[in-house]
Image (cartoon, rainbow, N blue to C red):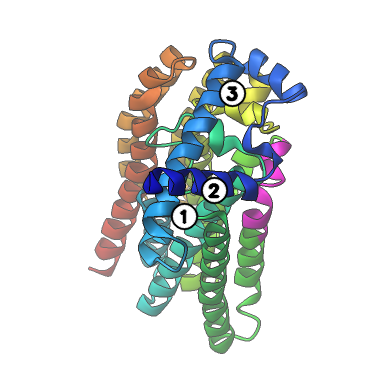
């Protein structure tokens, strides 16, 4: 009886702390659910929110509140932080091919970008749990719907916010150290990197509360975790932004844009309840799946275009190997855009396309750089 009573008290305390969106299905939100997911209905989403509250209460009883780096790490969705790592590798090997590479700058960029990516994920979880209530009703997949740490009671909203801000501060500090190093090397040399970094931080701050509500979330994701990292890392090594950097950043931009884009398909009903306005909501899943295919094709066309323009080495065509998982993702998106579990293989292939393309581009630049030095 005592254990049951403690569980009930923990659940009651959690509901007391939760904002008014604990059951975000009132008025216009109810109509949005009926429009966005008539097969689910209000009762199903209420039941899901109730289950979240039950599980969270159990989690609070198990662990209490406090500092736990492991829980913070899980909240950052570490399996997705590999995207940040391969982007640093992409920009660094491009610089190596162009004749410049510094291990210390590679290390600072790697730590900095991984921390910044982690901060985005943590702050997004905090916002979706505390502000919009989306995570209380969304059906999670291995690729979308947040980390699940807050809804499971493994991480409190305050801890997620604190961890996100700390990761943002650490990542920004790494960037400032890079900027200072560039100023030491050349007068005024750090200003371009400072501008790129400041833009990236602005993207992090605006991404969840603003961009996702005005139809710019996908674009900002592509900029913040695609184009800007490649440009910034390349500049950190070379102190220049040339045609090679711009051409190589195009597939990074488009593939990361599509990484978020496809992950929005399973979440779109819950996102509509949370008053988001991303492309899947604006276009509808069927038309949105066709746009996904076009953007994916454009990413690989960018690699071919860079080689044809003479800006990229022919070895960068190794990046076209990413077409294999990309084709699986496109085929799955076109066939199963309105199905939940059937879309899972496409979501996994989408991640694989991002990682494989950036890694194969890096391999091509590395080979070209070694041959140029031989």
Looking at the image, is 119 positioned above or below residue 152?
below
Could you tell me residue 6's position as x and y percent? 45, 49
Q: Residues within 10 Å of mark 1 (few under 14, many from 20)?
A: many
Precedes in sequence: disc 2 or disc 1: 2
Q: Residues within 10 Å of mark 3 (few under 14, many from 20)?
A: many
CB under 8 Å between callouts 2 and 1?
yes
Q: Quadrant of the N terminus?
A: top left
In what element is the residue under mark 2? helix
Determine which residue is flagged by label 2: 125
Q: Nearer the viewer, residue 58 or 43?
A: 58
In what element is the residue under mark 3? helix
Looking at the image, is 289 positioned above or below residue 313?
above
Could you tell me residue 42's position as x and y percent? 61, 18
Region in magenta: 202-214
Precedes in sequence: disc 3 or disc 2: 2
Residue projecting furthest to the front? 1
Determine which residue is flagged by label 1: 155
Q: Is residue 180 left or right of residue 67?
A: right
The residues bearing labels 3 and 1 have C-alpha atoms spaced at a distance of 25 Å
Q: Judge whether residue 212 is colored magenta.
A: yes
For the point 64% across and 70% down, the residue is 192
Determine which residue is flagged by label 3: 269
Q: Is residue 200 left or right of residue 77?
A: right
Q: Quarter-wise, where is residue 283 in the image?
A: top right
CB under 8 Å between callouts 3 and 1?
no
Which label belongs to residue 357?
A: none
Looking at the image, is 108 positioned above or below residue 117?
below
The residues bearing labels 3 and 2 have C-alpha atoms spaced at a distance of 17 Å
């Amino acid at each position: 009886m005592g254990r049951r009573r403690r569980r009930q008290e923990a659940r009651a305390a959690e509901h007391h702390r939760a904002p008014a969106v604990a059951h975000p299905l009132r008025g216009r939100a109810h109509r949005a659910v009926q429009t966005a997911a008539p097969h689910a209905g209000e009762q199903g989403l209420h039941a899901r929110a109730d289950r979240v509250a039950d599980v969270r209460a159990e989690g609070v009883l198990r662990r209490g509140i406090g500092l736990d780096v492991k829980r913070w790490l899980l909240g950052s969705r570490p399996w997705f932080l590999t995207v940040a790592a391969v982007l640093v590798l992409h920009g660094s090997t491009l610089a190596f091919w162009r004749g410049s590479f510094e291990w210390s700058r590679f290390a600072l960029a790697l730590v900095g970008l991984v921390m910044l990516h982690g901060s985005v994920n943590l702050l997004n979880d905090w916002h979706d749990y505390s502000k919009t209530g989306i995570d209380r009703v969304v059906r999670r997949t291995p690729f979308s719907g947040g980390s699940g740490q807050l809804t499971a009671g493994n991480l409190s909203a305050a801890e997620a916010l604190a961890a996100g801000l700390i990761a943002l501060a650490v990542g920004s500090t790494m960037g400032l150290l890079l900027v200072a190093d560039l100023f030491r090397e050349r007068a005024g040399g750090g200003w371009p990197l400072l501008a790129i970094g400041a833009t990236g931080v602005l993207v992090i701050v605006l991404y969840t509360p603003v961009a996702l509500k005005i139809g710019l979330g996908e674009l900002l994701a592509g900029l913040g975790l695609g184009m800007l990292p490649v440009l910034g890392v390349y500049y950190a090594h070379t102190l220049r932004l040339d045609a090679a950097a711009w051409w190589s950043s195009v597939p990074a931009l488009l593939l990361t844009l599509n990484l978020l884009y496809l992950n929005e398909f399973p979440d779109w009903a819950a996102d509509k309840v949370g008053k988001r306005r991303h492309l899947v909501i604006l276009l509808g899943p069927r038309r949105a799946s066709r746009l996904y295919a076009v953007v994916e094709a454009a990413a690989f066309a960018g690699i071919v275009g860079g080689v044809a323009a003479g800006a990229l080495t022919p070895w960068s065509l190794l990046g076209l190997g990413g077409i294999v998982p990309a084709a699986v993702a496109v085929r799955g998106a076109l066939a199963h855009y309105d199905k939940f579990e059937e879309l899972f293989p496409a979501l996994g292939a989408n991640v694989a396309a991002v990682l494989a393309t950036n890694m194969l581009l890096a391999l091509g630049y590395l080979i070209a750089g070694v041959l140029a030095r031989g």
